[in-house]
Amino acid sequence: MTRLTSKQRAHLRALAHHLKPVAHLGAEGLTEAALRGILEAFNTRELLKVKVLESAPGSARQAADAIVARLEGVHVAQTIGRTVVLYRRHPDKPEIQLP
């Protein structure tokens, strides 16, 4: 999959509404440890939220772009405020069926 369509992003946003952030990016920004934590979270789920704290060096959109650039197969479903919703299809057992 190269890009998410607007219909797919809307579906993922609806599914992510009730989720709590599983990772927080603080003053150090996107560190290797934070990236490793996000990657580990993708081992157990396909959709997750990342909270970019006020003390982070960049915006939520910049953090989302950096994560997508460094992790293969990750897509940004939404950035709202300081929260980023990320999606990565599970390679073996996908649970989310995109429209």
Image (spheres, grey):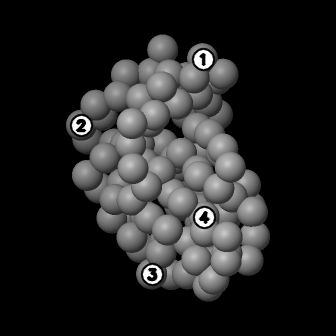
Q: Which residue is mark 4?
A: 52
Residues at marks 2 and 1 touching, judged by CB atoms closer than 8 Å: no
Residue mark closest to the camera, 4 vs 3: 4
**Mark 4 touches mark 3? (CB < 8 Å):** no
Earlier in the chain: of badge 2 and badge 1, it is: 1
Query: In whole angstroms, how far apart are the C-alphas of marks 4 and 1?
Result: 25 Å
Secondary structure under tag 2 reads loop
From this view, report whether residue 90 is shown above or below residue 61: above
Percent x, y of residue 37: 39, 70
Q: Earlier in the sequence, mark 2 or mark 3?
A: 3
Element under label 3?
helix
The amino acid type found where label 4 is placed reads Val
Asked if disc 1 and disc 3 are in contact, CB closer than 8 Å, the reply is no
As shown in the figure, which amino acid type bears the numbered disc 3? Ala
For the residue pair 7 and 83, the one nearer the viewer reads as 83
Looking at the rendering, in which quadrant would you find the N terminus?
top right
Q: CA distance from mark 4 to mark 2?
A: 29 Å
Q: Earlier in the sequence, mark 4 or mark 1?
A: 1
- Whether 5 is drawn above or below 37: the answer is above
Residue 58 occupies quadrant:
bottom right
Residue 25 visible (yes or no): yes
Percent coordinates x, y for residue 69 in the rendering = 65, 61
Q: Residue at x 51, y 57 (%)?
A: 50
Identify the mark nearer the N-term, 4 or 3: 3
Badge 4 or badge 2: first in the primary sequence: 4
Marks 4 & 1, CB-CB < 8 Å contact = no
Q: What label sits on residue 93 in the rendered view?
A: 2
Q: Residue 5 in the image: x percent, y percent? A: 64, 23
Tell me the distance, in whole angstroms, between the alpha carbons under discs 2 and 1: 22 Å
